[in-house]
Image (cartoon, coloured by chain):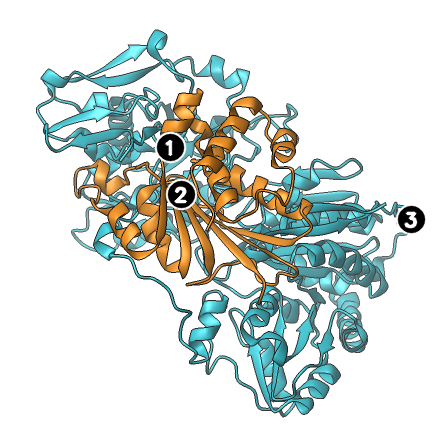
Chain colours: A cyan, B orange
Amino acid sequence: MSVRKLLTGNEAVAQGAWEAGVRFASAYPGTPSTEILETIAEYEGIVAEWAPNEKVAFEAAMGGAFAGARTLASMKHVGVNVAADPLLTMAYMGVNGGFVLVTADEPGQHSSQNEQDNRRYAAFAKVPMLEPSDSQESKDMMRVAYEVSEAFDTPVLFRMTTRVCHSKGIVECGERTEVPVRTYVKDVRKYITVPAFAQKMRVRVEERMKRLAEYSDASPLNAIEWNGRAVGVVASGVCFRYAKEVFGDAASYLKLGFTHPLPDARLKEFCAGVETVYVVEENDPIIEERIRILGFACRGKDLFPPYGEMTPDVLRKALGRGELPHLEASPERIVPRPPGLCAGCPHRGFFHEVGKRKNLVVAGDIGCYTLGFTEPYNAMDYNACMGASISSGHGFQQVLDMVPGEKRRVLSVIGDSTFFHTGVNSLLDVAYNRSRTVSVILDNRITGMTGHQQNPGTGYTLQGKPTKEVDLVALVRACGIEHVVTIDPNDLTAVRNALDWALSLDEPSVIITVWPCVLKKMTQADLSRFPDLFSGKCRVIEEKCIGCRMCLRTGCPSLIYDAAKNKVWIDPAQCVGCTVCKQVCKPEAIVKDFKETAAAPGALAGAKGGKG
Amino acid sequence: MAGTSEILLVGVGGQGTLLASNLLTLALMEAGYDVKMAEIHGMSQRGGSVSSQVRYGDRVESPVIELGGADILVSFEQMEALRWLPYLKPTGRVVVNDYRIAPAPVLSGKVPYPDGILDELRGKADTTVVDAAGIAKRLGNARAMNLVLLGALVKGMDLVSCVDWERVIRENVKRDVELNLKAFREGMAQVGTR
């Protein structure tokens, strides 16, 4: 029986995986993909796991597919870079049970460091790709993806984009098809990739691509909608939806859902059937290039931007149709709302102290703590990708040390989840090559920025069940680091002392700051380990405040400066009593009131406002 | 697409725009419309400017609202109404919560919270100012302001009779159902039909 549900694309992928009989799924969280595994975890019949990184997630799912079950791995676009190594060889080996890798791309870079087009991975790995345009298709195409994977003995790439992941639409949901685990039969010519075998696999990959090209031309996922013949639009994914809004019912459409290999015969038929072809695609001109190779002219990136989302207003403007009539607001009345560290964020005390020091180069990483670069901290020099802080910091220090008279020291800063992701190998490099960098692991007891996912350091699984917790200090020591200290980042004296100590050493050292993310759902273990959590709130004694605003340099959003009085006050709805502001207040105008006056933690940001 | 209606809900991360837009979208589905809703999650969410974009009609293609596209702009905060005003049709309607949340540059004393926002809104568009926070507080919980604004929106878009709203709220709001129902009704009373 079918049920209509309102689902995001990510939820629809999970529903589709369940209906397709998937039995095992693994992922590392990353916007905009995170909710896929979080939703899959709610279904009976699928073993769902967080992995420490995307390569591990991919490989776990790959092993499950070899063993004969339908499996899934999901990740954000840059996660596929991490998983590219197994992807490109699994493409040779094929599957036993069906295997789908969901890549969630980010045109517009809403929450990402780059805008790479992972359609390139389908061509690079020589595997098929499907691209849904909305929630219904996200669900429906999962079933097709598994059929293709098993019929053509190949991993399948399933490309989502932010708008498909996070938009809701109505989905007709169905029942689960129980797909039995296929028998695993040892077959070294299929599963052992020594050159003698891999060379033969390589040939089979090309044969497979030819059969997939025929499939693509025959697939109902690549469909022509004939209307007027003056204008024809070729598009895949959400771009098709955008194009429909702008080109309307007068234009004809070739909607592509099976996008690698592209359907050459369909493309030719369509391009020959209309006067002007427009190709609407986000990021790279991949469809456009194919059309040109097939010998047709088209309008694409000569009109439309090669970056950002192809939303209807972007298309309209690029087509020279201007914008829809709209109102303008006075820009002087609009103040930006930049992202910042939350009140009570355990990164605040650390970055407040780091920002005060000169002669430091701070190598950053991927997480909330990247905001250490912002004012008022100004405490980060660069960041690149997951795990790069510790390793690049080492290289940075090596070169600084070659420069005569250069005194600067490198501080590499990484979060707990990012450390488990790819920081451990970087720390091995630091220990092995006897670097004198200072590596700092900001352990906030959770994967914070993506919305609080468990990781190997938290002691809980994706489903919130207790599991083995990594002993971080033992892990750091086992890497070969002799100098390790663990501190409370809310204690500014401890932060200063730890930095002084680490910078006095000429050998590799690690500082671990431990305090839970203020937004985290605290476990009983957290509450007993951190008895000071939510133990009270800070308050300004107005007569003692001299208006020096030193406290504002901590960047805490619960501190509000009243210009008329030249005083600061603390919003009790936001303050959690971390006392960082109290420690920097020279006239001792800030006090902490313990528990009896404290309100419940996790109060809404909205509570800080007032009637205008 | 012709025949598509567009609702833009905006505010500051943490204000409860999500619950309001979820209820709205569910109700529109039950009323028999095709409906799509777009949101952006991630780094800018907390304390940042947030929007939920809802489009409904016989058949909806794009989930996003473009410049000059929205029939109604419901803002949970004063300045956010101005920030998103260009997304409203010039003939569209503004429902704005009489409520301010200071952004970081205001909290730190670098710039004042801008004055004259409501006057500017009134001068440029058909604007209804709702004291949603005051109403919700009087009813017993300031957090119910999102249901006050949902009520105002439902009246403003002439959606009152398309579905049994009270049932939708009862089925989907977990806490303080009676308070939220009162908030919803008071919200409806704040807005006239056109």
- The nearer-to-camera label among 1 and 3 is 1
Q: CA distance from mark 3 to mark 2?
A: 54 Å
Residue in the image at 23% along x and 50% along y: A333
Image marks 1 and 2: residues in contact by CB distance under 8 Å: yes
Is residue A607 something that shows in the picture? yes
Q: Is residue A254 left or right of residue A577?
A: right
Disc 2: which residue = B11
Disc 3: which residue = A183
Disc 1: which residue = A606
Q: Amino acid at mark 1?
A: Gly
Q: Position of residue B163 (x, y in %)?
A: 65, 42
Q: Amino acid at mark 3?
A: Thr
Query: Badge 2: few (under 14), some or many (20 or more) residues near its Cα, within 10 Å?
Result: many
Q: Relative to A257, say whether A535 is above or below.
A: above
Q: Position of residue A225 (x, y in %)?
A: 71, 77
* Between B7 and A352, the one nearer to me in the picture: B7
Q: Relative to A96, say whether A267 is above or below.
A: below
Q: Specify the subunit that label 1 lies on.
A: A
